[in-house]
Image (spheres, rainbow, N blue to C red):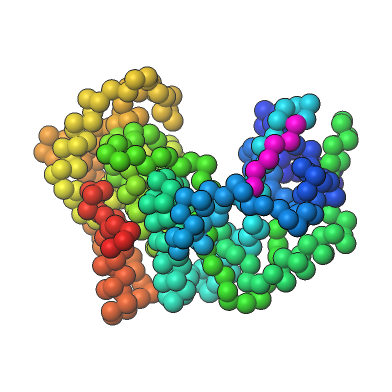
Amino acid sequence: MNEAIEEELLTGGRLEYFHHTQPGQVLYGRFKIISKLGYGSSSTVWLAENIKLEAAHSKRIAEADPSHEGLSFVRLPLEAFQLHAPQGTYFCLVFEPMRETLFDLQRRLPGNRIPLQLFKLYVFCLLEALDYLHSGCHLIHTDIKDDNIMITFEHDAVLKNFATRQKDSLQPRRTRPGDGRAIYLSQSDFGPLQGRRLLPKLADFNLCFPGVENQEHLSAIQAHRYHAPEVLLGCPWSYSVDIWNLGLLMWNLLEDISLFERPAGGDGEYDAHVHLAQMVSLLGVPPKLVIERERLLRQNRLKKSILNARGKECMNMNEFWGGPFFDDDDSIMRKDLIRREITLADTVKHLQGDDKEQFLDFASGMLEWLPEKRRRLRN
C-alpha cells in the first residue's frame, strides 16, 4: 500500500502517540496479538489470545453487584494493564471479543429493522443493563446509542475460525517510508451470521457520570440528536437522561428512523432551537414547569466560563446551547420551526393494532418532557 491508511490519517501528528502494535507480538507477557479489528481517534483495537489460561478477571467493574441480571448485558473490562515505552505509558483494557455493533447487525436485517420479537428481547436486555448501571454501579451512561451497544458471537466457532484465518494469512499493511513503521488495515468482518443466539451488551463507559443522590449535573452530554430536553435547555440532569436515550433508540431499532433527524441550523451546525421545535412538533407543548426551570437557569452562573461550538464565551449552560428558548408568552422562540403534519403515532409504520398501541404507550413514557415523569427502570 502506498497511500496513508487508518490512524496514519489522523491530524496533528497523533500517530506518534499510538503504541506500535503488531501481529505476533506478546503484550504484558500474556496477550498474543492476532489481528487488528479497528481504530479510533486515540486508540486501536486488536484481537488477542490469552496465552496464560489462568488469567484472573480481577478488574471487573461487575463487583458492584455480581448477582444482578443486568450484569450479563454490560460489556466491562476483564483486565487492565499498562505498557511503558519511550513515547510514554499506554493504558490497555482487555475485553471479551464482540461480533459487531447493534448498528452493524441492523444493517444485515430486512429493511434495516429489528423484528418485533427480537426487539422486545433486546429492549429487555438493555433495560436490565441500565438498571444494573444505575442501581448497582450508580453511574449515568450519557451516550446510549446503537454503536455503543455490542452484539455477542452466535457461537465460539465463529471467532475461533476467524482467528485461525488471520494467523494463517498475511495481513494487509502499509510500511511508512520514513520510519519503517507498519500500519495494519483493520480486519473486522467475521462473515455471515451462523445462528440466532446474538445478545446485546451495553458498552463504552468513558463518558459516564456518577449518579449522586439528590445531586444533578450541569454539563454538555449526549450525541446531538439524542439530547434530552433538560440538557439542551441548560437545566440540571441525572439518571433519566439515559431513559430518554433508550426511548429514542427504540425508534432506531424498530423503524430505522431517528425521531429528531439532524437538528441543524442554516449553517449545518447543531441548533438547539431546531431540536426543541422538533420535540414540540412530535411531543406537544412542554409543561409549564419545564419553561419555569429554563427561565430560572438563565440566571445560574457557572464557576468558570466555557466556549460553545461557535466560539462564544458562555457563563451558563442555557447560553451555551443558544438560549433563551421561551418568550414571555411561554411559547418557544422559534415557533416558525414547528411542524404539525405528523404525530408521534404516525412515526410507527411497521406495527398495527395492539402491538402499535402497546409500543407507543411504553415508549412515549420514556420521552416525557419532565425527567421525573419518565418511566422508571423497575416499573
Q: In which quarter of the view is residue 376 placed?
A: bottom left
Residue visible at 63% across and 52% down in the picture: 57
Q: Is residue 15 left or right of residue 325?
A: right
- Residue 309, above or below 345: above
Describe residue 166's horizontal placement relative to residue 83 as left or right. Answer: right
**What is the quadrant of residue 270 in the picture?**
top left
Relative placement, left or right, of 128 versus 171 is left
Say which residue appears at 49% left-offset and 57% top-offset. 66
Compared with 276, 365 (above or below) is below
Magenta part of the chain: 79-84
Counting from the top left corner in percent of width and height, residue 293 is at: 19, 37
Please say if 158 is above or below 207: below
82 or 257: which is nearer to us? 82
The answer to whether one can see residue 281 in this image is: no
Residue 185: % across, % down: 77, 50
Residue 251, percent across and down? Answer: 39, 63
Residue 80 lies in the magenta stretch: yes
Asked whether residue 192 is in view, the answer is yes
Let me know if residue 18 is in the magenta part: no
Q: Main secondary structure of the magenta part?
A: strand
371, 312: nearer the viewer: 371
Q: Residue at x 65, y 43 (%)?
A: 80
Count of numbered labels shown in the rendering:
0
Residue 357: % across, % down: 27, 73
Q: Residue furthest bottom?
A: 353
Which residue is rendered at x = 73% and y = 56% of the image? Answer: 54
Q: Nearer the viewer, residue 154 or 322?
A: 154
Q: Is 38 left, or right, of 273 in this rendering?
A: right
Can you say which quadrant of the picture contains the C terminus? bottom left
Residue, far left: 329
In the rendered view, tell whether residue 123 sits above or below residue 48: below
